Image: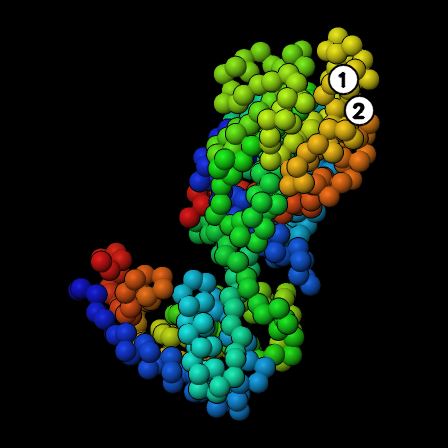
Amino acid sequence: MKHLLSTRDLTRHEAIGILDVAEDMADVQSREVRKLPTLRGRTVVNLFFEDSTRTRISFEAAAKRLSADVINFSAKGSSVSKGESLKDTAQTLAAIGADVVVIRHPASGAPQVLAQSNWIEAGIINAGDGTHEHPTQGLLDAFTIRKRLHGTASRGRSLDGVRVTIVGDILHSRVARSNVWLLTSLGAQVHLVAPATLLPVGVANWPVTVGYDLDEAIDAGTDVVMMLRIQAERMMSGGFFPNAREYSRRWGLDDARVDRLPAATMVMHPGPMNRGLEISSRAADSPRSTVLEQVSNGVSVRMAVLYLVLSGERGELS
Amino acid sequence: MPPRVVLQQADIARALTRISHEILESNRGPDDLVILGIPTRGVILAERIARLISDISGRPVASGSLDVTMYRDDLSRNPTRAPSPTRVPAAGIDGSVVVLVDDVLYSGRTIRSALDALGAIGRPRIVRLATLIDRGHRELPIRPDFVGKNLPSAQGERIYVRLHESDGDEFVSIDSGENGAPK
C-alpha cells in the first residue's frame, strides 16, 4: 500500500487484510512491552492544517509504538499562517526526510494532490480532508464493530449482514463517507438518517438506504447506531435546522431512544461529542457505547496502516 | 534437475520423535518447557513436538506461536508481510525454558528476530532452538540445539518443507531453484 487516501479505493479483501493486521497490533497493546521496533529510523510527519486532538494523538501514539520518529506540524504558528503554499510545505518536509506524511486539511482532495504531485516521495495518509474522507476513522469503526461482534475470533471476518444506522450531519461528514464506502464493501447494510437539509446532493447514488426519522429506524431494528457530531464550524451559514433543541428532539439519541434500543445494539460516536445535542450523557456512558473502544482501537488501526504504508517495496499485502 | 525428496513422512516423524527425546534429556524432564513455533510451519512442528513430549513424559507441555514479522530487519527489502498472531501460554514465559521451533534454519536472521520478539513478551530462564532442517549459510552467530537433519545446500538451491496441516501432503525436498514450487 503506497498511500491511504480513501476507503473507496480499498477492495473488500484489502480492507479485511488491514483489519487483521490491526488485530495483531491490538494484541501488542496488551503486552508487557507495548513497543515494536518495526519502523525504527523512519520519520512520520503529522501535518495538521485543522484542529484535532484525538486523530493527531492517535497517529502519534501509533507511530511511537512502532518506534518511528514523529514530527508534529500544526498550521497555527507555522509558516502556513505567513502564506506558505502546500507545495512549499511539502517540499520542506521532503527535504527534512519524511517517510510518511499524515495530513489533515480543510480542502477536500488535498491529500490526493500531495500523493499525485512530485513534490514529495513519502507515503501519504489522509487523516481527514474537508468533507471528503477520513479513512482511518472508517477503518477503526469497522474494526470496533467486528471486535464487538466476534471478539477474539474476528480475524478474517467481514461485516456481512450487519445493519448500521448513521445519524446526523451526513452532508459535512467525512466520517460518514468513509464509513459508507468501507462498511458496504465489507458487506454491511448502511442506513442514513438525517434532516433533508443535511443530506448531500447525489446521496441517491450511494449504496445505502435513506430515512428522515430516527424513531422509525430504531423500530426497524439495527445492530449499530452511529451518531455524527453536529459540526458547528462548518455550518456558519446556518439554516440547516431551526435550532439545536429541535435537532436534538428529532435526531438526537436521547435517553428515551437509547432505552428502546436492544441491549446488543452498539452506540458509536467518532468524537468529539456534543453531549445533550446529538447524544445524551446516558447514551454516551452506557455499556453499549463504544466511544472509548473506538479511541483505543484507533491506535491499533493506525499502527496497521503505518506498517502497511511503510513496509515492503511499496508492494501489495502478500 | 527435478526436485529431490530428502525426507519422507516417516523420516519427519522419526526426526521429531528424536528431537522430543533430546529436549527431554537436556531439560531433565518436561518441567517449565514451553515450545514456541515460528509461523507458519514452525507452529505446526512445535505443536507436534509438544504432543510427543507429553506422550513420552506423561505430563502436559505448553506450546504456542511467536510471530517475528514486526522484528525483522528486512521489511523494506521484501514485499509486505502480513503478521500472524502470537500465542503464548496464559501463565507467560517468565522463568520458563523456551524451545523455539522453525522448519528451516538458514541465515539465522529469523531467529535473531525471534529472540527480540521473545524479549518483548517476557524473560525465559533458557532459550533453545530446534529446527527440522539446518541448511547452513549462517550470517549470524546462531547455532541450533536440536536438528532434525543437516542438509548441506548451495545458496541458489531451494528447500521445501510440506506438512499435512498446511499443505495436505508431507515431505521435504530440495531443488536447484529453477523449477518453482513442487507440484
Chain letter for the residue marked with disc 1 in the picture: A
Locate residue B182, reporting x and y percent. 24, 60
Residue B134 higher or lower than B163, as above or below: below
Q: Residue at x 62, y 68 (%)?
A: B90
The quadrant where residue A168 appears: top right
The quadrant where residue A109 appears: top right
Chain letter for the residue marked with disc 2 in the picture: A
Q: Residue at x 48, y 51 (%)?
A: B82
Q: Residue furthest left?
A: B1
The quadrant where residue A29 appears: bottom right
Q: Is residue A272 left or right of residue A173?
A: right
Kindly check if marks 2 and 1 are in contact, taking CB atoms under 8 A apart as contact: yes
Q: Name the residue beneath numbered marker 1.
A: A247
Locate residue A270, reporting x and y percent. 69, 33
The three-letter code of the residue at mark 1 reads Tyr
Secondary structure of the residue carrying tag 1 is helix
Query: In the rendering, which numbered label is found on residue A197?
Result: none
Residue B150 higher or lower than B120, as above or below: below
Q: Is residue B38 visible?
A: yes
Same chain for the residues under marks 2 and 1 in the image: yes
Q: Residue at x 58, y 70 (%)?
A: B89
Q: Nearer the viewer, residue A24 or A264?
A: A264
Cα gap from disc 2 to disc 1, whole angstroms: 8 Å
Query: In the rendering, which numbered label is found on residue A277?
Result: 2
- Crowding near the residue tagged with mark 2, few <14, some 14–19, many ≥20 C-alpha atoms within 10 Å: many
Secondary structure of the residue carrying tag 2 is loop
Mark closer to the chain start, 2 or 1: 1
Q: Residue at x 68, y 23 (%)?
A: A215
